[in-house]
């Protein structure tokens, strides 16, 4: 399967010292009432993407995340379990994944299909496969946003994720505009539905001329963690104009993604 990337936008908290709320309010003039951090992050990436390429009204929107809006879930736990209080209406609404899709789609002015997907493993891969199936049927452009926010209680998130407590939880917002059209594309993404074994991966690496990049779960020397690291690798390789074989692992299963800048 192959998709072509036509525009990107990026934000990582370990690379950019930014108050997202202030940026949206002062520079982007966004109404921030009834919204919260996860939505702010989604809007930031979307508006930056809009600056880098035209977005068609009929485009589809796919947002994905390793753990979703984990901070607001913690707030719900505080309301219900600890304080024995009722949930505030807008906190409940913002807890729903597609609420972020609604605000992002509204700001981008798009009316196509809008999907929120969450998974704690192979997150970005699952979404790419969903997008490819949708594009084959509808032949639309798709906006994909990968959003992971560092939790206010990172130790809990690390235990859920199954990563070492010593790693640094990073907030990341990566967007791409993708289609089946190769003309004027920034890069090609190649992927499949197969799960590879460790021995198969070792054989692939021996024959590979591309730079090989491992996911944060596989690379114990990488001290920064967010679940949708694959989306960052795509954007980084485009900016570097560098071919890459990205390898992601989870519980002794592996998947690969080939990134080829054009």
Image (cartoon, helix red, strand yellow):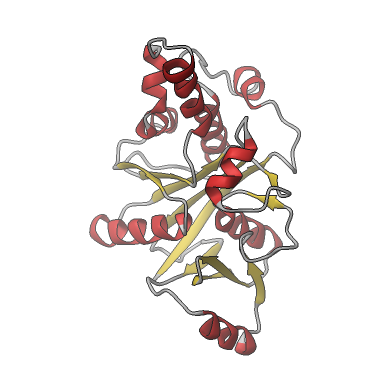
Q: Is residue 63 visible?
A: yes
Residue ID at (70%, 50%): 224
| Residue sitting nearer the eye, 1 or 172 | 172
User: As drawn, is 19 to the left or to the right of 135?
Assistant: right
Is 93 above or below relative to 220? Answer: above
Q: Quadrant of the C terminus?
A: bottom right
Residue lying at 55% horizontally and 50% vertically, measured from the top left: 161
Q: Is residue 242 above or below residue 140?
A: below
Residue 40: quadrant of the picture:
top right
Q: Which residue is drawn at the image coordinates 25% and 55% (left, top)?
A: 138
Position of residue 49 measured from the top left corner of the image (x, y, whole percent): 54, 41
> Is 118 on the left-hand or right-hand side of 25?
left
Which residue is at the front of the view, 43 or 99?
99
Percent position (x, y) of residue 164?
67, 53
Return the x and y of residue 80 as percentages of the image width and height.
Answer: 41, 17
The N terminus lies in quadrant: bottom left
In this view, 203 is above or below 53: below
Q: Position of residue 189 (x, y in %)?
A: 49, 67
- In the image, 62: left or right of 252? left
Residue toward you, 93 or 115: 93
Viewed as shown, does residue 207 lie left or right of 54? right
Q: Is residue 174 visible?
A: no
């Amino acid at each position: 399967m192959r998709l072509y990337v036509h525009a990107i936008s990026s934000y990582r908290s370990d690379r950019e010292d930014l108050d997202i709320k202030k940026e949206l309010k002062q520079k982007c003039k966004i109404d921030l009432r009834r919204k919260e951090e996860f939505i702010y992050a989604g809007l930031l990436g979307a508006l930056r993407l809009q600056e880098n390429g035209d977005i068609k009204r009929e485009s589809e929107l796919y947002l994905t995340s390793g753990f979703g809006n984990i901070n607001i879930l913690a707030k719900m736990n505080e309301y219900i379990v600890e304080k024995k209080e009722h949930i505030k209406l807008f906190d409940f609404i913002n807890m729903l994944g597609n609420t972020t899709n609604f605000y992002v789609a509204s700001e981008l002015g798009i009316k196509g299909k809008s999907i929120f997907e969450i998974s704690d493993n192979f997150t970005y891969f699952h979404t790419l496969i969903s997008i490819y199936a949708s594009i084959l049927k509808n032949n639309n452009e798709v906006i994909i946003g990968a959003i992971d926010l560092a939790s206010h209680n990172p130790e809990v998130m690390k235990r859920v994720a199954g990563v070492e407590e010593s790693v640094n939880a990073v907030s990341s917002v990566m967007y791409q505009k993708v289609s089946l059209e190769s003309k004027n594309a920034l890069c090609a993404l190649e992927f499949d539905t197969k799960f590879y074994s460790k021995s198969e991966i070792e054989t692939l690496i021996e024959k590979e001329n591309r730079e090989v990049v491992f996911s944060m779960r596989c690379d114990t020397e990488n001290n920064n963690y967010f679940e949708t690291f694959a989306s960052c690798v795509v954007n980084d390789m485009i900016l570097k104009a560098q071919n890459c074989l990205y390898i992601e692992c989870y519980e002794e299963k592996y998947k690969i993604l080939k990134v080829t800048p054009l």
